[in-house]
Image: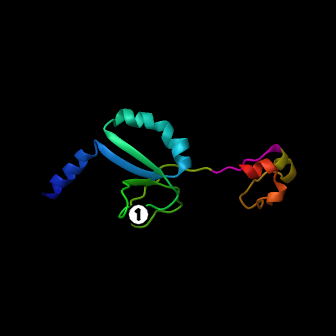
Amino acid sequence: MSCSRRCSSLRQDRSGGALNISTIASFLQKWLLPRLPQFHDRHPHIELSIHTSRDPVDFAQGDFHAALRMSATPTPGLYNEKLLDEWFVPVCSRELLARHGPVRHAGDRAPPAPEALPAAALLR
């Protein structure tokens, strides 16, 4: 089969079949799950299977087609595409804020020792 026929065949295969992806649980819950009904409406012939893990995916040994991960740099040897900007913000109780003050820069404060936190914070 010629290269152009193989490419054409691959494009046709994209319209249906299995799609196995791996992602982290928080991304699945907060971003991907709310969008799955729309994905299914637009691609009803794709059987989506989602696996959650923080472990790197070995595409040569596994059956995953894609993986969504948080990374500061591209993974060598794989196709990488930035999807989102990620924001991390400090969140605490009013009591902790009153005791230690606000964090204005990443290096302002070291995390408080566990004994300085209320017991409820340690259970979360």
The amino acid beneath tag 1 is Asp
**Observer-nearest of 98 and 93:** 93
Magenta segment, prevailing SS (helix, strand or loop): loop
The quadrant where residue 81 appears: bottom left
Q: Residue at x 38, y 35 (%)?
A: 40
Q: Residue at 84% x, 53% y: name it.
A: 100
Residue at image position (77%, 62%) is 110
Q: Is residue 102 left or right of residue 50?
A: right
**Residues drawn in magenta:** 88-94
Local packing at callout 1 (Cα closer than 10 Å; few below 14, some 14-19, many 20+) is few
Q: What residue lies at 57% left-to-right and 50% top-to-bottom?
A: 86
The magenta stretch spans residue 91: yes
Residue at the disc numbered 1: 58
Is 111 positioned to the left or the right of 31 in the image?
A: right
Q: Residue 95: x, y in percent?
A: 84, 46
Q: Position of residue 116 (x, y in %)?
A: 84, 56
Image quarter in which the N terminus is found: bottom left
